Image (cartoon, coloured by chain):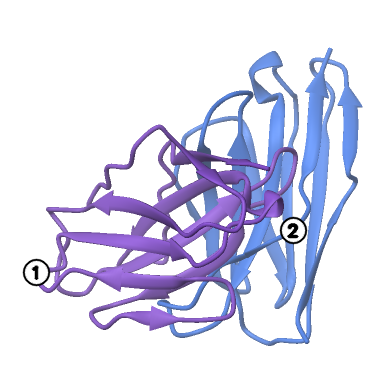
Amino acid sequence: DAKTTQPNSMESNEEEPVHLPCNHSTISGTDYIHWYRQLPSQGPEYVIHGLTSNVNNRMASLAIAEDRKSSTLILHRATLRDAAVYYCILSGSNYKLTFGKGTLLTVNP
Amino acid sequence: SQTIHQWPATLVQPVGSPLSLECTVEGTSNPNLYWYRQAAGRGLQLLFYSVGIGQISSEVPQNLSASRPQDRQFILSSKKLLLSDSGFYLCAWSPRPVSGPQHFGDGTRLSIL
């Protein structure tokens, strides 16, 4: 499975935008880029996913580089409830998601 | 809307005892189903996934097994639990096609004594 690289931790202030980076230089042409987040003692929550084009939903935006070797999850206005571990995952045709260590996002009031 | 139910929420079992965790999905048909485990302070590890009734793929050799007796029911079992089986067990489902997102249950926190 293609791997992703994320910073271990990031910090943001409430109501400011947050850009969470992810590198996936070995991505294949059929791999989708998924983002999930996990709060303590809860199951992961789906955030967004995309293939080639940038994507927007009510939770976040996903910006995908033209060569697809990196992507950025954008939270437009961070709230305290956005504090979580964020996982960037590549998913191909084999149904499987391989979770790494993710990025621990801290949001300061 | 679709929902996923997983129980029990917490479980304390002695070493060597059997295990049965159940997961059911409502509001969809023919989902892909998954079992994950998260050990303390570590990432999620995929244990099993299923693309249909009776079709189980194992990702990690261990003393756990999974079964899918009905379309929307996924069961994780063990005949004899080990201390190393402690962890947070999560069931998830995804719609077809395979690029669809996975939706997770609330998990079962299993402690082995």
In the image, taking residue B65 as reference, residue A61 lies left or right, namely left
Q: Colour of chain B?
A: blue
- Marked residue chain, label 1: A
- Residue B30 locus on image (x, y percent): 62, 84
Residue found 25% across the figure and 69% down from its top: A31
Residue found 27% across the figure and 62% down from its top: A71
In the image, taking residue B57 as reference, residue B107 lies left or right, namely right
Q: Colour of chain A?
A: purple
Element type where label 2 sits in the image: loop
At label 1, counting other C-alpha atoms closer than 10 Å, the crowd grade (few under 14, some 14-19, many 20 or more) is: few
Where, by quadrant of the figure, is residue A59 drawn? bottom right
In the image, taking residue A72 as reference, residue B30 lies left or right, namely right
**Answer yes or no: do the residues labelled 2 and 1 have beta carbons within 8 Å?**
no
Q: Circle 1 sits on which residue?
A: A67
- Residue B53 locus on image (x, y percent): 63, 74
Of the pair A57 and B59, the residue shown nearer to us: A57
- Label 2 and label 1: CA atoms lie apart by 34 Å
Residue found 82% across the figure and 43% down from its top: B20
Q: Circle 2 sits on which residue?
A: B105
Where, by quadrant of the figure, is residue B55 drawn? bottom right
The type of residue carrying mark 1 is Asp
* Same chain check for tags 2 and 1: no
Q: Quadrant of the C terminus of chain A?
A: top right
- Label annotation for residue B23: none
